[in-house]
Image (cartoon, coloured by chain):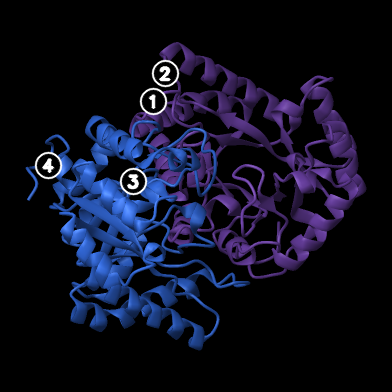
Chain colours: A purple, B blue
Amino acid sequence: MREAPGTAPDLGWLSFNQMTCDPADLSLAIEATAKGGLQWIGVWRHKIKDAPVEEFGKRIRDAGLRVSGLCRGGMFPALTAEERQHRIDDNFRALDEAAALGTDTLVMVCGGLPAGSRDLDGARQMVVDGLSAMVPHAKARGVRIGIEPLHPMYNADRAVVATLGLANDMAERVGSDQVGVVIDVYHVWWDPQVYREIERARGRIFGFHVCDWLVPTPHMLMGRGMMGDGVIEIARLRQAVEGQGYTGPIECEIFNQAVWDAPIDDTIARMKQTYLDWC
Amino acid sequence: MREAPGTAPDLGWLSFNQMTCDPADLSLAIEATAKGGLQWIGVWRHKIKDAPVEEFGKRIRDAGLRVSGLCRGGMFPALTAEERQHRIDDNFRALDEAAALGTDTLVMVCGGLPAGSRDLDGARQMVVDGLSAMVPHAKARGVRIGIEPLHPMYNADRAVVATLGLANDMAERVGSDQVGVVIDVYHVWWDPQVYREIERARGRIFGFHVCDWLVPTPHMLMGRGMMGDGVIEIARLRQAVEGQGYTGPIECEIFNQAVWDAPIDDTIARMKQTYLDWC
């Protein structure tokens, strides 16, 4: 359990999201995270290959690490009922994988508009339906479903859940303790309602991610910065989240080719320092 | 006065925002807009050159056109009081220019964070202060100040007014009939609160802009699409705005190199057709 809010960031809760170094495979990411003295790692599903997921779960435990969250479930909206069921079935597998890795949190990137569709309300309903369909399986596996609102610039193609307010609305509509939110500063920092919605999320904050917003942003997808290199009030957001009782790991997740091109050990060292300085 | 909401779009209210064809100077834009049979043009300040603004006002009237709005005032946040006053003085000149062009609306791009600053609340306060400082001069010139919320991806560097909700809050805080909002579908379409906030904006909607959100978006600044080429429910938004009593011109404003590269007459013809088809 972390100290009271307002205290300095604690390296014991910092988690290395493996997409902060895409060139590394999962085995290397595990090794580098442990070597860097961290206790947590964030895992992506598409990186689980060359060995069964249970094997990776064992390797992570053997390295003295815990998995802060598995990315990603979601991608619910689709044009046909058959395809939507297909996506839900895949989310069941994601829950199985999360349990096998020993994490209690599946991070959800809920999906954008179906191809060719302009029906935003309809797509948002499909997200709520998909989340609801996941609840019994999530309970059975002991895995929580964390709805991650994405920045509105991804509304069309990645997540129609464009604000923390909408993620809170959806969690309330599903109405299960199994469903909450994951807050990434990159996606929510601009929102005039963010502090109010963090308060509203009390009790259902399942994850907290950090990075920074660069000015100018070099790329819509690959333009994230290391903490301190941008303009987000990261420490203020962390304290707000912790002020609502969040005591879990803090994942650093950066999509940026320049960061990816650096040696993984250097990236982890820099992440640790900027976390202490800016989070 | 336009027909009741729910009716088809009327070309008599379509306005050609001159930045839909950046290569054309203002004289050519005036000529092409009139030749295209339109009655309205949207003007940008940086295009007023080679002749005094009063001269352009006369040319526009002589061409049988009216100016739907002048872009742009704003850019309030700055690190020093002196620089902020400098920006406000420039906004006074923008009001003078709007009056000289014969338009009753100055469109405000309110500005991002001051260089090197992370103080988002502070920057937003500077916007409210700047708007308030403009009110007496705006009244004297008979020009309305339209706060344009910009897409959150421009929050850091162009407009800390990231939502229509915040624009409404600011207009209420300034508390003058002279201050309202300008709604561009590109900036607000993703917002789960947009229809509620359009209702709240009743009586202070000073402008309505259309274009489309392309998937994928080719560029953060220059990635707008012609109506129908993207995923925005434009007609629904138009009807919502008109449902709140908006009866003014509808500006088409597209920043996109491919659109800019087309001959201006072709662009205006295509704009007219896609407006009828999709707005």
Residue at left 78%, top 48%?
A: A259
> Could you give the CA–CA distance between mark 4 and mark 2, rounded to whole angstroms?
30 Å
Q: Which mark is residue A117?
A: 1
User: Could you say whether the residue bearing mark 2 is in a helix, strand or loop?
Assistant: loop
Q: Which mark is residue B118?
A: none
Please name the residue that numbered disc 3 is placed on. B185
**Residue sticking out furthest to the top:** A82
User: Could you say whether the residue bearing mark 4 is in a helix, strand or loop?
Assistant: loop
Chain letter of the residue beneath label 1 in the structure image: A
Looking at the rendered structure, the kind of residue marked 3 is Val
Location of the C terminus of chain A by quadrant is: bottom right
- Disc 1 with disc 3 on a shared chain: no
User: What x and y, as percent, mark residue B95?
Assistant: 29, 74
Residue at left 38%, top 67%?
A: B50
Marks 3 and 4 in Cβ contact (< 8 Å): no
Foreground residue among A230 and A144: A230
Q: Residues within 10 Å of mark 2 (few under 14, many from 20)?
A: some
Q: Write down the quadrant of residue B135 in the picture.
A: bottom left
User: Could you say whether the residue bearing mark 3 is in a helix, strand or loop?
Assistant: helix
> Could you give the CA–CA distance between mark 3 and mark 4, rounded to whole angstroms?
17 Å
Q: Nearer the viewer, mark 2 or mark 3?
A: 3
User: What x and y, as percent, mark residue B197?
Assistant: 27, 54
Please name the residue that numbered disc 2 is placed on. A79
